[in-house]
Amino acid sequence: MQLVATRRLEGSFRILVALAATRGRMTHAQDIATAAGLDVVAVRQLTRVLERARFITSKSGPAGGYRMAEDPEAISVMAVLDAVEGRLEIGYCTLRGVECPPSGVCALHLPWERGAGALRASLESLTLADLIGNFGAQGDV
């Protein structure tokens, strides 16, 4: 099993990092696309999701564009993951491959649930600002 970010999630983080770097200035989709290494169609699709989640705001017109709605310190990686991909849930039995019944859960259910909780806690403590700090050192999101 691999935990791999989808292209949609990776693109969302790239957009947020690019917008955070503009320090609150309105930025056009094409400029975001260039900074994030994405095509403008993907930027327009993902900015709708990010705006619905209230991470960014937009304004129409020549002086419009997109900008951060919140401080990068206030946005957790887990909040972005939840908004873009849906809430991380343990729903299926890891041994049986079916939904776990309330009674008679498999032997892996509770450890799996604890592991998912630890992952969630770790990603909740990591902020967009932390990614931005690592972006300069790593060269990639």
Image (cartoon, rainbow, N blue to C red):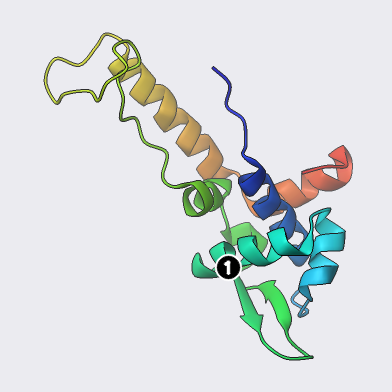
Q: Is residue 90 left or right of residue 137?
A: left
Residue 114, by quadrant, is top left
Residue at 70%, 74% (x, y): give it: 67
Residue 38 horizontal/vertical position (percent): 79, 55
Q: Which residue corresponds to the image point at 62% horizontal and 46% vertical from the top-left?
A: 9
Q: From the top left corner, tell me how far across and down residue 6 is, in percent.
A: 62, 39
Q: Which residue is mark 1?
A: 48
Point out the image quarter for the N terminus. Answer: top right
The answer to whether residue 17 of the structure is visible from this angle is yes
Instruction: Give the image location of residue 122, x and y in percent.
Output: 53, 36
Q: Identify the element where label 1 is drawn.
A: helix
Q: How many numbered marks are there? A: 1
Residue ID at (27%, 8%):
107
Left or right of residue 70: residue 16: right
Q: Position of residue 23 (x, y in %)?
A: 78, 72
Q: Amino acid at mark 1?
A: Arg
Label 1 neighbour load within 10 Å: few <14, some 14-19, many 20+: some
Above or below, 4 against 109 in this view is below
Front residue (pair 64, 138)? 64
